[in-house]
């Protein structure tokens, strides 16, 4: 133990970098919105982030029993592997971003996810809803449309159980959940700031609420149309193979009308959406915790979401949650894994936000055209938190065209005197890339991993981390994104 403690300073310097002198620390600053820590971190400080990704990808395949019982400890190990050396070497400069990402990002993220998961778990859709290719396509289309108005997380939590129930007698259904992640959990949220966190950040930084509705609509329609067509063809192929003689058999079973129970939970769901929107409009002031501004409207939002969740638990009969096979395992898994991801993601986000001052300056120097913004912001959003990734490229685009944040509404107003077509083209690329390409991995967007966990809890065999990428996202999504590139960028 003493040997390990003596090694910590050495490990810290190797992993995080050399100890800074006071002038370097003062220049870098400690404000999380400033380049700060990211301007002095080397690329290899992202090793713990790579470690936790590889653990999520490989451990369920190589050591499934160990992973099932100890994934929380693995997540904590990688979080400590970054946090302890970083705090030892950089002191307050590391502490402030860590406090910031947990207070401002992780805790609200888990509260929102818990609230939506809890409320949606009390909504039961029953009846003769048979998972034919046509029915499945309609369900995915409904979820895709819903995602832009209640968020990708809200739509995912509301729609995933009806989709699973409709397909409970299907033999192969992993591909249905994967396309659900593509469409409902990601691309469907591209039309309003309520749909996905990056667009909500854009709204908070003066992008007009309905600008993205018209600006990204053609991109979304093209991507969704191709994906729904591919899904229908694939699901039809599997569906026919499951039927006797290779043909679709008629359903001679007793038909019961489709019924929705627990509809009062829709009021709680509307309450969550309203609280999120309120936190964007209402400016109630703030207080400071270790250099991090905690805004009162965000506290009201988080407390309100918790209240909506507990009201749902109180008013929803247990038989409805039992009918949904509701359990807490998925939200616990997501909470533990993302606690580690949010810690280890800090150096990657910090270096990215440092721009030309950071270790990725060489890469960012080539990001000039809309196509580069689309692919770089999208690729990074596949693995990093897409909200700060969006904001980083948003500010890069402003700087590139010589604009300030105050000029954004005029630039986005088509036909206005201050209209800036170069900025609008870049913002379209950033918005589409950040939202669409979150579907490339299980960790690219908040609901992806949650949907996977809920499906596995229900006994559906889901592809592994790499299986999802190499079997589905790379051969299916990437060609779609290439087509979007040629058509629009």
Image (cartoon, rainbow, N blue to C red):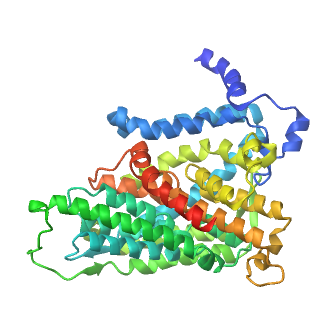
Q: Is residue 313 left or right of residue 164?
A: right
Q: Choose top left, top right, bottom left or bottom right for residue 482.
A: bottom right
Q: Is residue 397 left or right of residue 337?
A: right
Q: Residue at x 71, y 65 (%)?
A: 426
Residue at the extreme top of the image, as rendered: 3
Q: Is residue 469 left or right of residue 196?
A: left
| Residue 345 in view in this figure | yes
| Residue 110 in view in this figure | no
| Nearer to me, 456 or 173 | 173
Expressed as whole percent of the image width and height from the top left, the position of residue 290 reads 75, 50
Q: Residue at x 74, y 48 (%)?
A: 364
Expressed as whole percent of the image width and height from the top left, the position of residue 383 reads 56, 48
Residue at the extreme front of the image, as rendered: 486
Q: Residue at x 45, y 76 (%)?
A: 146
Q: Is residue 112 above or below residue 441?
A: below
Q: Quadrant of the C terminus?
A: bottom right
Q: Is residue 133 left or right of residue 248?
A: right
Q: Quadrant of the N terminus?
A: top right
């Amino acid at each position: 133990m003493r040997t390990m403690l003596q090694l910590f300073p050495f490990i810290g310097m190797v992993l995080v970098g050399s100890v800074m002198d006071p002038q370097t620390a003062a220049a870098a600053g400690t404000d999380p919105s400033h380049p700060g820590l990211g301007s002095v971190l080397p690329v290899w400080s992202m090793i713990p982030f790579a470690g936790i990704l590889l653990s999520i990808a490989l451990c369920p395949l190589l050591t499934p029993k160990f992973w099932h019982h100890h994934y929380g400890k693995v997540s904590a190990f990688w979080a400590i592997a970054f946090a302890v050396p970083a705090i030892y070497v950089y002191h307050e400069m590391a502490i402030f971003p860590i406090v910031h990402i947990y207070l401002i990002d992780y805790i609200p993220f888990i509260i929102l996810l818990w609230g939506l998961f809890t409320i949606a778990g009390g909504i039961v859709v029953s009846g003769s809803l048979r998972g034919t290719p046509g029915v499945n396509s309609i369900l995915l289309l409904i979820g895709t449309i819903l995602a832009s108005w209640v968020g990708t997380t809200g739509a995912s939590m509301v729609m995933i159980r009806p989709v699973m129930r409709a397909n409970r007698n299907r033999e192969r259904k992993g591909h249905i959940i994967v396309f659900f992640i593509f469409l409902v959990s990601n691309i469907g949220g591209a039309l309003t700031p309520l749909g996905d966190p990056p667009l909500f950040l854009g709204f908070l930084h003066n992008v007009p609420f309905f600008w993205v509705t018209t600006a990204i609509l053609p991109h979304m329609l093209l991507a969704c149309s191709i994906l729904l067509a591919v899904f229908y063809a694939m699901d039809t192929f599997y569906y026919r193979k499951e039927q006797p003689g290779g043909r679709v058999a008629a359903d001679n079973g007793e038909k019961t009308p489709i019924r929705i129970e627990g509809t009062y939970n829709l009021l709680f769901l509307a309450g969550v959406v309203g609280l999120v929107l309120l936190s964007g409009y209402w400016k109630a002031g703030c207080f400071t915790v270790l250099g991090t501004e905690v805004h009162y409207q965000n506290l009201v939002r988080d407390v309100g979401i918790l209240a909506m969740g507990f009201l749902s638990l109180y008013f929803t009969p247990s038989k409805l949650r039992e009918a949904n096979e509701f359990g807490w395992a998925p939200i616990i898994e997501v909470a533990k894994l993302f606690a580690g991801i949010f810690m280890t993601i800090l150096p990657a986000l910090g270096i990215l936000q440092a721009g030309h001052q950071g270790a990725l300056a060489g890469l960012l120097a080539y990001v000039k055209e809309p196509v580069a913004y689309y692919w770089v912001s999208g690729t990074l959003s596949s693995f990093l938190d897409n909200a700060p990734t969006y904001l980083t490229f948003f500010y890069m685009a402003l700087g590139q065209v010589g604009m300030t944040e105050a000029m954004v509404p005029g630039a986005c107003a088509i036909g206005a005197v201050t209209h800036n077509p170069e900025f609008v083209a870049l913002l379209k690329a950033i918005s589409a890339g950040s939202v669409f390409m979150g579907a490339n991995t299980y960790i690219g967007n908040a609901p992806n991993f949650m949907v996977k966990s809920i499906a596995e809890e229900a006994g559906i065999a889901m592809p592994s981390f790499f299986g999802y990428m190499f079997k589905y996202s790379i051969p299916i999504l990437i060609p779609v994104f290439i087509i979007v590139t040629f058509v629009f960028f």
